[in-house]
């Protein structure tokens, strides 16, 4: 239903403009005027670039007057520099929802609420978690373009008949059982690598299993106040110490690249790993014979009732400050984020979670059986995301640095004090940024 409505709205928007094209209220050409818009996205793999082109194809058919030029592999730094330099593209997308607070508060990405209201776009087409991570303090400067959900991948052969763990204590015990070492302690197969330096095993993705709240109600750092953080840190450190820090580092230095066929899970060197739903697409292309399963991420033992939930975030799309064709840019943003067929086309090709309710339920989704786990995690009412802040994901970066540089190497003698000091440091940075 929403695909038809969105496309019709886009066509009405074009036809309602003055014949022959004119100027919109923001000074750019009207949506029906002949024009070329520049679009930047962050995808770089061949199948990802093609997927974006395929999704835009429907827009090009509906808007033959708009030439869409697409540039991939453009991340937040390039986007921010272009905006600051006064020569931004017309449409941008970002993988980093943590930076949304900066984008909205600074005005680097334009407020979309007036356009949403004018075109009567019902935000109810997006699940609540998605609505939350596309706005900051009431400012909605982005719309969602697919979502990511995280789950547990497991190699069925290496599992040797074991069931996927549902709690973090079960995960630790099974990781030890499945690990294979040489006599000198060298890790040949890791049951589960707890270090934050292992790809997606960042605090942002693992700590939610302990029910953590990153920021308090006052918007300040919550690391010393929420016991979930200490539980997470102690769990990961115990397992890392069992491996031995030097053995773990040696293993991680030997690993292949995360987004190449040499990825250690795909090569059978890791039995279990937390990863995003997109891994199903990479396995399909790079390790098609791999016999694997997926399950929700394990949860802390005192949160068994929350098993099935997880962590989510996603790609966001918006119009940067200084865009020269804002009306045409809005037409494209609205199309790609609300048109069911466009969302489904991207989800099928990229292996990402659809970000609208209609796309989630679409019979046109063609994804492997293992993908269902991520759809279920995404829908779970207990699934959480990391909140936006005025200085982006600085609080996440600082916590990860604390874990990597101090906690994992055993340099923290007083964890409570270490977390209090971290809160003070983060709060100072938030205050300087206007938080």
Image: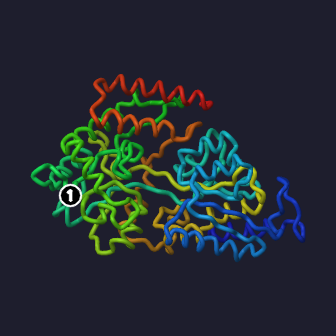
Q: How many residues crowd around disc 1 within 10 Å: few (fewer than 14), some, or many (20 or more)? A: many
Q: Secondary structure at mark 1?
A: strand
- Of residue 403 and residue 232, the one placed in the foreground of this image is 403
From the image, which quarter does the C terminus lie in? top right
- Residue 431 higher or lower than 327, as above or below: above
Specify whether 14 is left or right of 389: right
Q: Quadrant of residue 231?
A: top left
Q: Quadrant of residue 119?
A: bottom right
Q: Which residue is mark 1?
A: 189
Question: Where is residue 377 shown, x and y percent of the image?
Answer: 41, 55
Question: Where is residue 384 shown, x and y percent of the image?
Answer: 45, 46
Question: Where is residue 335 shown, x and y percent of the image?
Answer: 66, 65
Q: Quadrant of residue 115?
A: bottom right
Q: Is residue 182 visible?
A: yes
Q: Looking at the image, how many numbered discs can be counted on the residues?
A: 1
Q: How was the colour assigned to the protein in this rendering?
A: rainbow
Specify whether 39 is left or right of 22: left
From the image, which quarter does the N terminus lie in? bottom right
- Of residue 287 and residue 244, the one placed in the foreground of this image is 244
Specify whether 108 is left or right of 97: right
Residue drawn at the location 28% of the way across and 56% of the way down: 254
Q: Is residue 113 visible?
A: no
- Residue 242 higher or lower than 87, as above or below: above
- Residue 234 higher or lower than 132, as above or below: above
Residue drawn at the location 85% of the way across and 58% of the way down: 24
- Residue 385 higher or lower than 267, as above or below: above
Residue drawn at the location 86% of the way across and 65% of the way down: 17
Question: Where is residue 263 shown, x and y percent of the image?
Answer: 33, 62
Specify whether 76 is left or right of 251: right
């Amino acid at each position: 239903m929403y695909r038809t409505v969105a496309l019709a709205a886009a066509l009405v928007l074009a036809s309602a403009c003055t014949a022959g094209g004119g100027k919109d209220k923001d000074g750019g050409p009207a949506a029906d005027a002949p024009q070329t818009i520049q679009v930047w996205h962050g995808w770089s793999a061949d199948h990802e670039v093609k997927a974006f082109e395929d999704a835009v194809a429907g827009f090009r058919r509906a808007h033959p007057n708009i030439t869409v030029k697409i540039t991939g592999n453009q991340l937040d730094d390039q986007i921010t520099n272009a905006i600051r330099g006064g020569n931004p593209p017309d449409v941008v997308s970002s993988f980093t929802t943590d930076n949304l607070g900066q984008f909205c508060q600074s005005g680097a990405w334009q407020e979309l609420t007036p356009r949403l209201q004018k075109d009567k776009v019902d935000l109810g087409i997006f699940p609540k978690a998605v609505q939350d991570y596309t706005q900051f303090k009431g400012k909605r400067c982005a719309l969602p373009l697919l979502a990511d959900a995280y789950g547990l991948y497991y190699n069925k052969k290496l599992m040797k008949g074991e069931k996927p763990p549902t709690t973090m204590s079960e995960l630790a015990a099974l990781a030890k059982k499945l690990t294979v070492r040489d006599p000198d302690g060298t890790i040949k197969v890791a049951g589960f690598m707890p270090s934050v330096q292992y790809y997606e095993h960042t605090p942002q993705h693992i700590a939610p299993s302990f029910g953590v709240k990153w920021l308090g109600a006052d918007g300040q750092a919550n690391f010393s106040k929420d016991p979930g953080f200490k539980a997470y840190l102690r769990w990961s450190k115990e397992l890392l110490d069992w491996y031995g820090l030097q053995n773990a580092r040696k293993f991680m230095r030997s690993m292949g690249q995360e987004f190449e066929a040499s990825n250690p899970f795909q090569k059978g060197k890791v039995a279990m790993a937390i990863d995003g739903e997109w891994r199903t697409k990479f396995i399909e292309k790079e390790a098609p014979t791999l016999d694997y399963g997926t399950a929700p991420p394990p949860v802390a033992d005192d949160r068994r009732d929350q098993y099935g939930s997880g962590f989510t975030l996603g790609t966001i799309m918006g119009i940067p400050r200084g865009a020269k064709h804002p009306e045409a840019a809005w037409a494209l943003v609205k199309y790609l984020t609300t048109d069911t067929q466009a969302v489904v086309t991207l989800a099928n090709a990229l292996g990402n979670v659809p970000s609208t309710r209609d796309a989630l339920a679409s019979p046109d989704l063609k994804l492997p059986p293992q993908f269902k786990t991520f759809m279920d995690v995404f829908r779970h009412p207990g699934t959480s995301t990391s909140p936006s802040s005025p200085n982006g994901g600085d609080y996440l970066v600082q916590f990860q640095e604390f874990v990597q540089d101090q906690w994992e190497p055993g340099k923290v003698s007083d964890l409570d004090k270490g977390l209090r000091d971290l809160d003070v440091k983060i709060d100072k940075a938030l205050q300087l940024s206007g938080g």
